[in-house]
C-alpha cells in the first residue's frame, strides 16, 4: 500500500471524528446561557436605576424618607451585585473545575478505552490474521462511538476537539521523525557485546534529549539491531524502549512531550535538567546494570567487526537537516512566539503552523532521501500505519478517563502527597497519554498553592518553589515530571515511540513480547522496583 493511500485514509478517519466534533456546535448550550447571564446582570442593577428615574422633588421629610429608601435600595443593589459576583465566581470555578471540557462522562464510558487496550493485548495472540486486517476498523469504530456520545448525549464536543488536535500534533511529530530518520543509515562497526550495548544505549539516551525520544529511537533502533545480529533477543528491544524511547528523554523539554508541555506553560527550559539530572543518572545506571546482567548471560555471539570499515559510518547524512527542521518546528507555537499565527483561533483548525511544517517535512524527507539508505534500513510504511490507526482510537477513547482523572485530582488536590503525585502521574502515564496526565496533575498540584496552571507567571513561581507546610512546590513538579517520563515505559502505549520501536523490530523479523507479556515479564519486575527505589530516595522524605 502506497504512502499516499495511507495518508489519505488517515485523513478520512480524522475527518469522521471531526464531523462528530463540529456537530456539537449545533447542540451546544453556550448560546442559551448567554442571554440568561445578561438578564441577571441587568436585574442586579435595576433597583438603582429605578431610584434615579422615579426620584421626585417632594418635601424635606419625604425627601429624607426617600433618601433612606434610596440608601436601602443601594445597599440591596450592592448585596445583589455581590451575590451576582459570587455566582459568577462560582460559575468560573465550576468552569475551571471542568477544565473547559464540559460535563463529566459516566464511569462506564471508560469501557471503549479498556476494550481497545484488551484487543491490542489479545488480538495478535488469539486472532492475529483477523486483527492485522481489521484493527483500523475497531480503532476508528470505538473512537466514533465515544465522539458520538460526547456530541449527542453530553452535548459537548470539546473533549473530542482536544483529542483531534492532540492526535494531529502527535502523529505529525512521530510520522515526520520516522520518515526523516529512516533516510539516515547508521552503521556501528563493533561486536555486539554487553559492554558495547550499554555504551550504545547510554549514548542514544543522551541524544534523546536533543532530537527527542522519537528521533533517537528511529535513528538508533536499526543500527542497534544490526549490532546484535545473531544474538538479538526480545529483551534487547524492551530495554531499548525503556531507555532510549522513555527514561533517556527526561533531561530537556525537547526530550519528551509532557516536559515540552510544561515548558509551553511556563516551566523554564533549563529547570528540567537542573532538577532531574541527579535522578535521571541513577535510574539510567540501574536499568543499564540490569540489562548488562541479562545480556551477559546471552552466550550467542554476533559477527566480528569488519576491519575494512570505520567504527561509525553514516549514509544519508543530509536527512539530519530534516530532523533539525522538525525539532526547530516544535517551538513554532503561538504560546512561545507571539508572531506565530494561531490557526485554531483564527479559523478553528485542529492544527497549527507547526503541524503543517512537520507533514510537509515528512513528504520532502521521503522524496529527497538517499534511496540506498532507505533500502538498507528496510524502510516501509507499516510501522507508522499501525501507530496511526491504533492511536487514533486511543486518543478518542481515553478522553473519558482523562476527564474523570482530572476531576478526581482537582477534588482531592489538598490531600495528595508528593508520593501520590509521583505514583499517580506515573501509573496513569503508563496506560494513558503522558502529556495530558502530566498537565492534569500539574494543575491539581498548583491548585494547592492557589496558583493557576494557565498563568505562565504562576507556573514559574511554582517551579521556583513555594512553601506549603514545609513542602516546596518544586518537589511536586519534580515528581510529576520524572514520573510522566519514566513510567511511559511501563507499556507499549505509554509513549509515542514505544509502539514504533516494536513495529520496526517485528518488521525486521525480531520477535517482541506481546502487550501483556511486556508488562508482566519486563516492566513490572524490572522497572517498577527501580521506580520505587527512586521514590524512596528522592520523594519519600526518608532519605533526601
Image: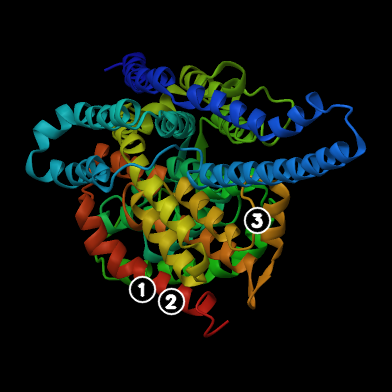
Q: Please identify the residue farthest to the right as the structure is shown.
A: 60
Q: Quadrant of residue 233?
A: bottom left
Where is residue 521 drawn, in percent x and y? 22, 63
Q: Residue at x 55, y 42 (%)?
A: 91
In this view, the residue in front, 205 or 81, is 81
Per the image, the residue denoted by label 2 is: 533
Q: Quarter holding the N terminus? A: top left
Query: Which SS class for mark 1?
Result: helix
Tell how many labels. Answer: 3
Per the image, the residue denoted by label 1 is: 529
Do labels 3 and 1 touch, CB within 8 Å?
no
Do labels 1 and 2 touch, CB within 8 Å?
yes
Is residue 504 visible in this depiction of the protein? yes
In this view, the residue in front, 90 or 290, is 90
| Label 1 – label 2 distance at C-alpha | 6 Å
In this view, the residue in front, 326 or 461, is 461
Question: Dot 1: within a 10 Å radius of its alpha carbon, few (fewer than 14), some, or many (20 or more) residues?
Answer: few
Residue 28 is left or right of residue 450, and the answer is left
Query: Which SS class for mark 2?
Result: helix
Q: Please identify the residue farthest to the bottom as the structure is shown.
A: 542
Per the image, the residue denoted by label 3 is: 451
Where is residue 394 drawn, in percent x and y? 32, 38
Question: Dot 2: within a 10 Å radius of its alpha carbon, few (fewer than 14), some, or many (20 or more) residues?
Answer: some
Amino acid at each position: 500500500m502506497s504512502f499516499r493511500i495511507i495518508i489519505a485514509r488517515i485523513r478520512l478517519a480524522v475527518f469522521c471524528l471531526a464531523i462528530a466534533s463540529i456537530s456539537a456546535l449545533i447542540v451546544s448550550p453556550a448560546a442559551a446561557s448567554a442571554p440568561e447571564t445578561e438578564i441577571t446582570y441587568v436585574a442586579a442593577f435595576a433597583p438603582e436605576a429605578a431610584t434615579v428615574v422615579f426620584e421626585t422633588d417632594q418635601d424635606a421629610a419625604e425627601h429624607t424618607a426617600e433618601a433612606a429608601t434610596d440608601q436601602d435600595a443601594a445597599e440591596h443593589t450592592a448585596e445583589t451585585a455581590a451575590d451576582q459576583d459570587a455566582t459568577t465566581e462560582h460559575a468560573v470555578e465550576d468552569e475551571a473545575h471542568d477544565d473547559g471540557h464540559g460535563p463529566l462522562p459516566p464511569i462506564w464510558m471508560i469501557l471503549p478505552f479498556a476494550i481497545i487496550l484488551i484487543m491490542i493485548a489479545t488480538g495478535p495472540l488469539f486472532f492475529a490474521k483477523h486483527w492485522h486486517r481489521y484493527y483500523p476498523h475497531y480503532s476508528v469504530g470505538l473512537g466514533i462511538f465515544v465522539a458520538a456520545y460526547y456530541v449527542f448525549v453530553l452535548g459537548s464536543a470539546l473533549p473530542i476537539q482536544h483529542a483531534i488536535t492532540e492526535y494531529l500534533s502527535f502523529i505529525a511529530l512521530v510520522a515526520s521523525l520516522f520518515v526523516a530518520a529512516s533516510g539516515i543509515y547508521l552503521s556501528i562497526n563493533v561486536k555486539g557485546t554487553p559492554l558495547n550495548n550499554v555504551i550504545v544505549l547510554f549514548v542514544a539516551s543522551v541524544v534523546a534529549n536533543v532530537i527527542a525520544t522519537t528521533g533517537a529511537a528511529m535513528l538508533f533502533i536499526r543500527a542497534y539491531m544490526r549490532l546484535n545480529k545473531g544474538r538479538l533477543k526480545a529483551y534487547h528491544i524492551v530495554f531499548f524502549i525503556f531507555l532510549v524511547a522513555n527514561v533517556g528523554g527526561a533531561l530537556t523539554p525537547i526530550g519528551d512531550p509532557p516536559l515540552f508541555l510544561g515548558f509551553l506553560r511556563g516551566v523554564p527550559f533549563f529547570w528540567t535538567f537542573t532538577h532531574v539530572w541527579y535522578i535521571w543518572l541513577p535510574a539510567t545506571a540501574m536499568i543499564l546494570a540490569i540489562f548488562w546482567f541479562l545480556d551477559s548471560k546471552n552466550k550467542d555471539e554476533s559477527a566480528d567487526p569488519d576491519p575494512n570499515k570505520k567504527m561509525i559510518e553514516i549514509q544519508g547524512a543530509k536527512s539530519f537537516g530534516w530532523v533539525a527542521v522538525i525539532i526547530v518546528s516544535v517551538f513554532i507555537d503561538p504560546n512561545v512566539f507571539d508572531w506565530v499565527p494561531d490557526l485554531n483561533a483564527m479559523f478553528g483548525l485542529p492544527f497549527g503552523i507547526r503541524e503543517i511544517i512537520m507533514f510537509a517535512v515528512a513528504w520532502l524527507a521521503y522524496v529527497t532521501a538517499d534511496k540506498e539508505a532507505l533500502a538498507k534500513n528496510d524502510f516501509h510504511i507499516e510501522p507508522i500505519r499501525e501507530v496511526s490507526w491504533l492511536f487514533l482510537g486511543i486518543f478518542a477513547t481515553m478522553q473519558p478517563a482523562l476527564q474523570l482523572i482530572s476531576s478526581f485530582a482537582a477534588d482531592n488536590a489538598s490531600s495528595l502527597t508528593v508520593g501520590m503525585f509521583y505514583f499517580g502521574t506515573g501509573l496513569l502515564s503508563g496506560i494513558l497519554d503522558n502529556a495530558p496526565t502530566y498537565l492534569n496533575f500539574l494543575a491539581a498540584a498548583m491548585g494547592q498553592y492557589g496558583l493557576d496552571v494557565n498563568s505562565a507567571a504562576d507556573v514559574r513561581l511554582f517551579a521556583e518553589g513555594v512553601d506549603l507546610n514545609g513542602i516546596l512546590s518544586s518537589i511536586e513538579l519534580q515528581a510529576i515530571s520524572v514520573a510522566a517520563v519514566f513510567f511511559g515505559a511501563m507499556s507499549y502505549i505509554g509513549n509515542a515511540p514505544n509502539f514504533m520501536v516494536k513495529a520496526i523490530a517485528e518488521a525486521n523479523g525480531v520477535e517482541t513480547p506481546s502487550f501483556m507479556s511486556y508488562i508482566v515479564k519486563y516492566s513490572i519486575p524490572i522497572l517498577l522496583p527501580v521506580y520505587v527505589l527512586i521514590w524512596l530516595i528522592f520523594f519519600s522524605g526518608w532519605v533526601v
